[in-house]
Amino acid sequence: MAYQRVLLKLSGEALMGDDAYGINKSVIESIVSEIQQVVADGCECAIVIGGGNIFRGIAPAAAGMDRATADYMGMIATVMNALALQDAMRRAGLEARVQSALRIDQVVEPYIRPKAIRYLEEKKVVIFAAGTGNPFFTTDTAAALRGAEIGAEIVLKATKVDGIYSADPAVHADATRYSAITFDEAIGKNLRVMDATAFALCRDQRLPIRVISLFKPGALRAAIRGDDEGTLVHI
């Protein structure tokens, strides 16, 4: 393997599959199967998960809501996704721990960096929930932050598409996929696969990002092997 410790960023929207919102059972089982393979290979895997699939269902009610309040609701949605992912892993025989940036001690552990690192060294999957614990920061930024904190060698951003394109491939048939791109280029071109804060943090910490497809079988394993999978964002 090219990487021994990775931070996997999963968007909440990806968990929906073809559903309007919520968690699609077959999708989450497929994700767990992919993670199980790389853990069996000996890779230490941490995960940051979004909450868009749940927040989308309540978005109409949140219209006009104070931004900080809406962001805290989104953080709680990520905790729900993290618990669902942990339970799916338990059923698959994979040991996982959820750590939350918001204190919900009766439900999940608080985020404690040394404890998270110890879990990884014990080959447990660590799922980081509730983003950074602060409003106005995305879960992409949380992925960059946690990746740097735990000493991950790369951030793997799993999306619905197989990399970063020059334009939205669902809208523009002539859009081309980048095999590799620098952080400065990604920020300068305003490529929205991750927000600029996450790109800047990874750039400053010299932490590469690889954007891969969540739905392509074997893509996660190939990326961890160091294959030319998806798009690499680098210094």
Image (cartoon, rainbow, N blue to C red):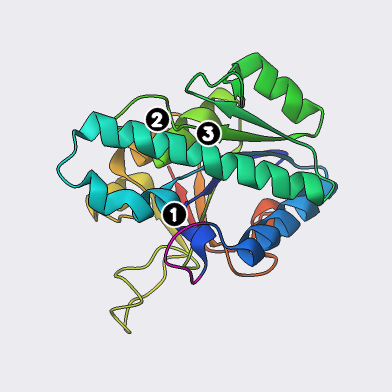
Left or right of residue 82, residue 44 in this image: right
Labels 2 and 1: the sequence-earlier one: 1
State the residue lying farthest toward the front: 61
Task: Residue 41: tell me if it is visible.
Answer: no
Res 223 quadrant in image: bottom right
Labels 1 and 3: the sequence-earlier one: 1
Left or right of residue 174, residue 102 in this image: right
Left or right of residue 55, residue 130 in this image: right
Q: CA distance from mark 1 to mark 3?
A: 14 Å
Res 70 quadrant in image: top left
Disc ID at residue 53: 1
Q: CA distance from mark 3 to mark 2?
A: 24 Å
- Residue 194 horizontal/vertical position (percent): 37, 49
Q: Is residue 61 above or below residue 129?
A: below
Provide the residue designation for mark 2.
Answer: 204
For label 1, the crowd category at 10 Å Cα-Cα, with few meaning under 14, some 14 to 19 and many 20 or more, is many
Provide the residue designation for mark 3.
Answer: 129
Q: CA distance from mark 2 to mark 1?
A: 30 Å
- Nearer to the camera, 141 or 1: 141
Secondary structure mostly taken by the magenta-highlighted segment of the chain: loop
The amino acid beneath tag 2 is Asp
Q: Is residue 19 magenta?
A: yes
- Nearer to the camera, 227 or 58: 58
